[in-house]
Amino acid sequence: GLEWLKQKLFRLGEDWYFLMTLGVLMALVSYAMNFAIGRVVRGSGIPELKTMLAGVILEDYLDIKNFGAKVVGLSCTLATGSTLFLGKVGPFVHLSVMMAAYLGRVRTTTIGEPENKSKQNEMLVAAAAVGVATVFAAPFSGVLFSIEVMSSHFSVWDYWRGFFAATCGAFMFRLLAVFNSEQETITSLYKTSFRVDVPFDLPEIFFFAALGGICGVLSCAYLFCQRTFLSFIKTNRFSSKLLATSKPVYSALATLVLASITYPPGVGRFLASRLSMKQHLDSLFDNHSWALMTRNSSPPWPEELDPQHLWWEWYHPRFTIFGTLAFFLVMKFWMLILATTIPMPAGYFMPIFILGAAIGRLLGEALAVAFPEGIVAGGVTNPIMPGGYALAGAAAFSGAVTHTISTALLAFELTGQIVHALPVLMAVLAANAIAQSCQPSFYDGTIIVKKLPYLPRILGRNIGSHRVRVEHFMNCSITTLAKDTPLQEVVKVVTSTDVAEYPLVESTESQILVGIVQRAQLVQALQAEPTSWAPGHQQCLQDILAGGCPTEPVTLTLFSETTMHQAHNLFKLLNLQSLFVTSRGRAVGCVSWVEMKKAISNLTNPPAPK
């Protein structure tokens, strides 16, 4: 019978089973793509991770099922090259923390120990460092960058974990390049040839500091425009509806606009659009002055990209070097802002790094033309190297946008040269001084626009937080449960409120705080309560507690006289969401992120007097 069935179904020349297989496979592919698009976490991923490390639980953010969707989405983003002009740092950090969370669960399951939230946070902080280190092969700056971006307070215990994991990741990343015959040995990612004996003259320190100031001002403009445009896209009726119902359509329209501009035979000719992101940095870090090289001769624009002369892509006889660099900065400024609204996994650090390099290159070329022989210092004249200014500009602009200092160290690890250590660090500090006083960082701004749980900083802001006490802004309308509360009243409280936990007080009269009762456990205990009691016995909460309903001790409270500054530091240091407030042991209120944010907002922007 099986032989007869085989002859009937698989007769020579019949192709229906191939068509059936084709239909089934394509249905599976289609479903998998829809599933992946539905699950993919769009954008960088760093703002969400920063929110999680502050103590907020985000559902499915660390689910390993998102890993494949993130990889596919990021691959598609990177395949667009200079069209979208986006990187991979943020998504790699997200991928790293997803893998760390999964390995952490495997570890706890294998050895049979209960889940430890502090242990998980240690793994996530180390994973963030690994994500940066495996992109740039920079373990030192990877660890420092993750510390600066992810948390306001850092445990020294996690320091060696981050360095160990980041070093392993960076070493393996560069070792794979050797195995793939891309490199002869383990070297820096972007090779430079700056002078080692006299990389810069002493008077140039002023120009490096000025470059930092320029990058700080431009970073403020970029952060303001990016946050404003992102808010407009989310609030505009047409764009918000398009993003809610047809994300691929919005992505296609935005990409079409960007691709039309960066088309190499068109406007892209003036944007060096044939260069990849790595080639952009390789060319901008060139230590020769393009303006001086093209003063007496005009290099041809090759039909094909010449790897030996990448800087030719930046030259046009009508625009000159200054025109193409300025045009590149103006166009990429708004094009990058538009690209950040596309709902696909993408990193935004590398494009910002390249923009900063272009700013520094423009200033370096201008100085090279102003001082063609170099600046005389101590009777010795050394030519100006625009590549050094490009390096300082990249570190300063990216550091100002992200509010980090570690970008200076990242620049040294990327190039393998530290000869510009002092001027680069001065430029980064000057840019950060301006940016941090005027605008929130790129990641904090994204948290604000996405309306993720966020506690504004008060350190370094002169808002008078030391004079405000907790009793001035705490929530006084809290629902307490006393041990002598009748059972009927307990049932009414549980059914009429939806809070996760209740403060437990000694008695209705004293209101002395003695513990915390979780709502879920209290409901379970009430449902298991026996219906019959001894005659004359009045049922109260104490009977429920004695019957096995667990309570938690109150390990930390705020006093009503505690200042806002002290309370804010506790919330940040311990990653707290709320704390009860007591006065002489009595529960008088509670403070959560909601009350804290409202109080900070009232100090920053005082309400108009009635």
Image (cartoon, helix red, strand yellow):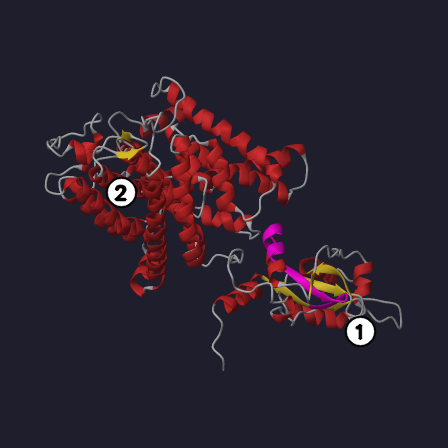
Where does residue 576 sit, x and y in percent of width and height?
A: 61, 55
Where does residue 302 sit, x and y in percent of width and height?
A: 13, 30
Q: Residue furthest right?
A: 535
Q: Quadrant of residue 27?
A: top left
Q: Is residue 194 above or below residue 244?
A: above
Q: Amino acid at mark 1?
A: Glu
Instruction: Give the residues drawn in magenta, as a range.
Output: 569-588
Q: Residue furthest bottom?
A: 610
Q: Residue at horizontal 35%, vertical 57%?
A: 224
* Residue position for label 2: 363
Where does residue 457 sit, x and y in percent of width and height?
A: 52, 56
SS state under label 2? helix
Magenta includes 471? no
Relative depth, front residue between 35 and 171? 171
Residue 79 placement, left or right of 178: left
Total number of numbered discs in the rendering: 2
* Residue position for label 1: 509
Q: Residue at horizontal 62%, vertical 68%?
A: 474
Magenta includes 576? yes
Ranked by sequence position, the earlier of labels 1 and 2 is: 2
Where does residue 568 sit, x and y in percent of width and height?
A: 59, 58
Q: Residue at horizontal 48%, vertical 33%?
A: 140
Q: Is residue 489 above or below residue 275?
A: below
Q: Residue at horizontal 66%, vertical 33%?
A: 111
Q: Amino acid at mark 2?
A: Leu
Residue 434 placement, left or right of 126: left
Residue 487, disc? none
SS state under label 1? loop
Tell me how far mark 1 sits from mark 2, CA to CA: 73 Å
Residue 72 placement, left or right of 569: left
Question: Few, some or many C-alpha atoms within 10 Å of disc 1 (few <14, some 14-19, many ≥20)?
Answer: few
